[in-house]
Image (cartoon, rainbow, N blue to C red):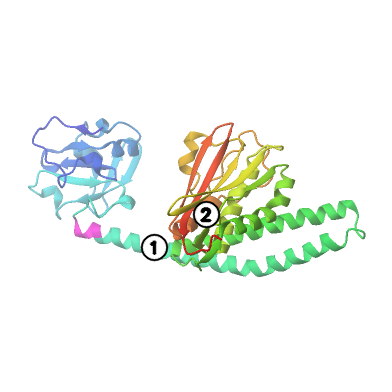
Amino acid sequence: MVARHPDPTAAPVSGRRLDDLPVAAIVVDPANDRVVEANAAAGALIGGSPDNLVVPPLSTILVGDDPGAELRIGDRTLPVSIVGPDGWRSSDKPVTLVLLDRLQLTLAVIDDDRLRDECRDLRRQLAEARTRQEKLVSVWAHELKTPLTIVQSYLEILTGDLDDGLSEEQLSFLTITKDSVLRLRRLVLDLVDLLALRSGHLSIEATIVDVARLLDDITDEMMPLAADAEVQLIHERPAIRVAIRADEDRVRQVVRNLLDNAFKFTQPGGRVTVRTRVDQNSVTIDVVDNGAGIPADALPRIFDEFVQLPPSGIRRRRRGSGLGLAISQQIAAAHGGAIEVESDLGKGSIFSLQLPREHNVDNS
């Protein structure tokens, strides 16, 4: 809500309501030594109602000249930027806009050339800093991949070939180490994919992929994880041969992510089913579980980066990076598809990967 001085002649700011501005702002009348109006963001910034700003004389709360002006409310001192002509205190113009939060200025609402240039410079600096950060993370991730792969390979040899030469305790230590390396390697690969997606450089190499064969391979690969989670994994094969034109490795990555999530949120003794639905132009791969389900208020956030849902009574076996669903959704989009979810709290969830159908396939 905007606090207003009882002055019907007060002019709007650039044709906009003051509360439309994405910054804390007040409108002042220097000639009459008063604040004309203030928006709710300004009230929040001073820790009170915007009405508190229209009561005292302007000269008692606005000190100094722009640049270097400050707003003083109680024991708080806030640097401000004044949008108006130079020499604004002696100006005969009745209205001047004071912006209290310079870091959130947007070009859409500010007409002053100096502030527009300042905002553009801040945005440029932010973009450059983000680019440097992403390059740094990318270099670290790629440097970590090789040693992690080597460590993983040797640990698999040790845990596979030395059963008779190691004690049960030593084998458990090796198994824990191997699992930790696998989680770390997966996190590194997720970060590499995330950076590639953000930069628009994700590689997609599309071929014609037989869906039933692909899902047979994936469910075979995931059987050990299903057994570890004490969950039954079922593949309901389609009645006809169905194909998609896609990057097989990327689709495999998405389905594995969906299955992995289903295992995490399904109680021991539960069931996870992979099935295929087909229509004229699309193929939909459903991953159906009878697990904990997802609260309705959490559904809009599950494809956001680094979001990890609470366990909802399920004993979580492994923590992920919070990137799997975000990356999977973007991989689906890169194929011209999407991932949708339906969930019933306490009864389970259905994650559906929809991809364009490939018709150039022999169904004999």
Q: Is residue 113 magenta?
A: yes
The kind of residue on which mark 2 rests is Ser
The residue under the point 24% across, 39% down is 19
Q: Earlier in the sequence, mark 1 or mark 2?
A: 1
- Counting from the top left corner in percent of width and height, residue 145 is at 64, 67
- Counting from the top left corner in percent of width and height, residue 27 is at 19, 41
User: Quadrant of the rendered structure where residue 54 is?
Assistant: top left
User: Quick check: 107 above or below 152?
Assistant: above
| Callout 2: SS | helix
Q: Which residues are magenta?
A: 112-116
Q: Is residue 93 magenta?
A: no
- Counting from the top left corner in percent of width and height, residue 111 is at 18, 54
The residue under the point 32% across, 35% down is 74
Which residue position is annotated with label 2?
328
Name the quadrant of the C terminus: bottom right
- Whether residue 192 is visible, yes or no, is no
